[in-house]
Amino acid sequence: MLNAAILMGRLVADPELRHTSNDISVTSFTVAVDRSYVKSGTDRQADFIDVVAWRSTAEFVCKYFRKGQLIAIQGSIQTRTYVDKDNNKRKAVEVVADSVHFAEPKRDSAASGSTYHSRPDSMEPAAPAYSNGSVGDFEEIPSDDDLPF
Protein backbone atom coordinates (compact mmCIF):
# COMPACT_ATOMS: atom_id res chain seq x y z
CA MET A 1 0.00 0.00 0.00
CA LEU A 2 1.09 3.55 -0.64
CA ASN A 3 -0.19 6.72 0.97
CA ALA A 4 1.96 9.71 0.11
CA ALA A 5 1.11 13.37 -0.35
CA ILE A 6 3.44 16.13 -1.51
CA LEU A 7 2.09 19.67 -1.56
CA MET A 8 3.39 23.13 -2.21
CA GLY A 9 1.21 26.14 -1.58
CA ARG A 10 0.65 29.24 0.48
CA LEU A 11 -0.51 29.36 4.09
CA VAL A 12 -4.03 30.77 4.40
CA ALA A 13 -3.46 31.97 8.00
CA ASP A 14 -0.73 32.07 10.64
CA PRO A 15 -0.36 28.60 12.21
CA GLU A 16 -1.04 28.41 15.95
CA LEU A 17 0.68 25.95 18.28
CA ARG A 18 -1.57 23.96 20.62
CA HIS A 19 -0.87 21.12 23.05
CA THR A 20 -2.79 17.94 23.79
CA SER A 21 -3.66 16.95 27.36
CA ASN A 22 -0.43 14.89 27.29
CA ASP A 23 1.53 18.04 26.34
CA ILE A 24 2.18 16.96 22.72
CA SER A 25 2.61 19.88 20.32
CA VAL A 26 0.16 20.04 17.41
CA THR A 27 -0.89 22.57 14.81
CA SER A 28 -3.41 22.48 12.00
CA PHE A 29 -3.39 24.88 9.09
CA THR A 30 -4.73 25.27 5.57
CA VAL A 31 -2.63 25.51 2.43
CA ALA A 32 -3.91 27.05 -0.82
CA VAL A 33 -2.56 24.98 -3.72
CA ASP A 34 -3.03 26.21 -7.29
CA ARG A 35 -4.46 23.71 -9.74
CA SER A 36 -2.16 22.84 -12.63
CA TYR A 37 -4.71 23.72 -15.31
CA VAL A 38 -6.83 26.73 -16.17
CA LYS A 39 -10.15 26.54 -18.02
CA SER A 40 -10.22 28.84 -21.00
CA GLY A 41 -11.66 32.23 -20.05
CA THR A 42 -11.47 31.69 -16.28
CA ASP A 43 -9.02 32.49 -13.50
CA ARG A 44 -6.74 29.83 -12.04
CA GLN A 45 -8.46 27.82 -9.31
CA ALA A 46 -6.96 26.72 -6.01
CA ASP A 47 -7.67 23.86 -3.64
CA PHE A 48 -7.61 24.55 0.10
CA ILE A 49 -6.05 21.57 1.84
CA ASP A 50 -6.08 21.01 5.59
CA VAL A 51 -2.78 19.90 7.13
CA VAL A 52 -1.92 18.66 10.63
CA ALA A 53 1.62 18.62 12.05
CA TRP A 54 2.69 17.02 15.34
CA ARG A 55 5.54 17.41 17.81
CA SER A 56 8.74 19.06 16.51
CA THR A 57 7.25 19.52 13.03
CA ALA A 58 4.39 21.52 14.56
CA GLU A 59 6.83 23.65 16.55
CA PHE A 60 8.94 24.26 13.43
CA VAL A 61 5.92 25.37 11.38
CA CYS A 62 4.66 27.73 14.07
CA LYS A 63 8.09 29.26 14.67
CA TYR A 64 9.12 29.92 11.06
CA PHE A 65 6.01 30.21 8.86
CA ARG A 66 3.41 32.97 8.50
CA LYS A 67 0.30 33.65 6.43
CA GLY A 68 1.04 33.93 2.71
CA GLN A 69 4.37 32.11 2.78
CA LEU A 70 5.09 29.35 0.31
CA ILE A 71 5.47 26.01 2.09
CA ALA A 72 6.32 22.49 0.88
CA ILE A 73 4.83 19.55 2.77
CA GLN A 74 5.48 15.84 2.59
CA GLY A 75 3.14 13.51 4.43
CA SER A 76 0.18 11.16 4.15
CA ILE A 77 -3.56 11.54 3.69
CA GLN A 78 -5.73 10.70 6.67
CA THR A 79 -9.52 10.51 6.95
CA ARG A 80 -11.58 10.58 10.10
CA THR A 81 -15.26 10.72 10.96
CA TYR A 82 -16.95 12.71 13.69
CA VAL A 83 -20.39 13.89 14.78
CA ASP A 84 -20.95 17.66 14.60
CA LYS A 85 -22.92 19.80 17.07
CA ASP A 86 -26.15 19.15 15.13
CA ASN A 87 -25.59 15.37 15.48
CA ASN A 88 -24.69 14.97 11.77
CA LYS A 89 -22.02 12.44 10.83
CA ARG A 90 -19.11 14.20 9.06
CA LYS A 91 -15.94 13.08 7.35
CA ALA A 92 -12.69 15.06 7.40
CA VAL A 93 -9.79 14.56 4.99
CA GLU A 94 -6.42 16.06 5.89
CA VAL A 95 -2.71 15.64 5.25
CA VAL A 96 -0.58 14.62 8.22
CA ALA A 97 2.78 16.32 7.67
CA ASP A 98 5.88 14.18 8.11
CA SER A 99 8.24 16.94 6.96
CA VAL A 100 7.90 20.60 6.07
CA HIS A 101 10.28 22.68 3.99
CA PHE A 102 10.82 26.30 3.03
CA ALA A 103 9.77 26.79 -0.60
CA GLU A 104 10.91 30.34 -1.28
CA PRO A 105 14.13 32.28 -0.77
CA LYS A 106 14.88 34.06 2.48
CA ARG A 107 14.21 37.78 2.39
CA ASP A 108 16.96 40.26 3.21
CA SER A 109 16.20 41.22 6.82
CA ALA A 110 17.64 44.72 6.36
CA ALA A 111 15.24 45.49 3.51
CA SER A 112 12.11 44.36 5.31
CA GLY A 113 10.80 43.28 8.68
CA SER A 114 9.48 40.02 7.24
CA THR A 115 11.75 37.02 7.20
CA TYR A 116 10.58 35.45 3.94
CA HIS A 117 9.07 36.80 0.77
CA SER A 118 7.33 35.92 -2.40
CA ARG A 119 8.29 37.46 -5.70
CA PRO A 120 4.97 38.33 -7.34
CA ASP A 121 6.75 40.27 -10.09
CA SER A 122 8.69 37.23 -11.28
CA MET A 123 8.21 33.49 -11.46
CA GLU A 124 11.98 32.93 -11.68
CA PRO A 125 13.99 32.06 -8.57
CA ALA A 126 16.25 34.71 -7.13
CA ALA A 127 19.85 34.60 -8.28
CA PRO A 128 22.27 33.36 -5.64
CA ALA A 129 24.27 36.03 -3.86
CA TYR A 130 28.03 35.50 -3.85
CA SER A 131 29.82 37.68 -1.37
CA ASN A 132 33.52 37.33 -1.92
CA GLY A 133 35.85 34.80 -3.36
CA SER A 134 38.75 34.51 -5.72
CA VAL A 135 40.51 31.93 -7.83
CA GLY A 136 43.07 31.67 -5.04
CA ASP A 137 40.40 30.06 -2.84
CA PHE A 138 40.58 26.90 -4.95
CA GLU A 139 43.34 24.38 -5.42
CA GLU A 140 43.92 22.22 -8.46
CA ILE A 141 43.21 18.53 -8.07
CA PRO A 142 46.09 16.52 -9.50
CA SER A 143 45.17 14.45 -12.54
CA ASP A 144 45.52 10.73 -11.96
CA ASP A 145 44.90 8.29 -14.78
CA ASP A 146 44.58 5.35 -12.35
CA LEU A 147 40.93 5.97 -11.51
CA PRO A 148 39.10 3.10 -9.80
CA PHE A 149 36.13 3.28 -12.19
Image (tube, rainbow, N blue to C red):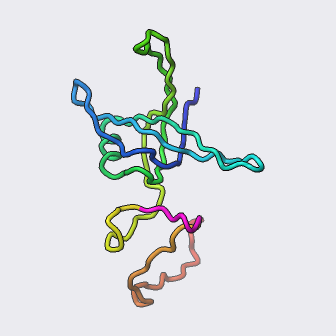
User: Looking at the rendering, in which quadrant would you find the C terminus?
Assistant: bottom right
Give the residue at the far right of this rendering: 40
Residue drawn at x 41%, y 34% is: 52
Q: What's the residue at 47%, 20% (across, down)?
A: 80
Residue 26 falls left or right of residue 78: left
Q: Give the answer, above or below, for where 57 lies relative to 127.
A: above
- In this rendering, the answer to whether 44 lies above or below 136 is above
Q: Which residues are magenta?
A: 117-123
Residue 140, image x and y in percent? Answer: 47, 85
The image shows a total of numbered marks equal to 0
Which secondary structure is most common in the magenta stretch? Answer: loop
Pinpoint residue 114: horizontal percent, then vertical percent: 35, 62
Q: Quadrant of the N terminus?
A: top right
- Residue 29 image position (x, y, % from top left): 41, 38
Q: Nearer the viewer, residue 90 or 108?
A: 90
Query: Is 15 or 5 nearer to us in this picture?
Result: 15
Identify the residue at image location x=48%, y=11%. Answer: 88
Residue 42 as seen in the image, left or right of residue 53: right
In the rendered image, residue 62 lying in the magenta stretch gets the answer: no
Residue located at (59% from left, 44% from top): 46
Residue 55 coordinates in the image, percent (x, y): 30, 36
Q: Nearer the viewer, residue 18 or 143?
A: 18
The residue lying toward the viewer, choosing from 131 and 83, is 83
Q: Residue furthest top?
A: 87
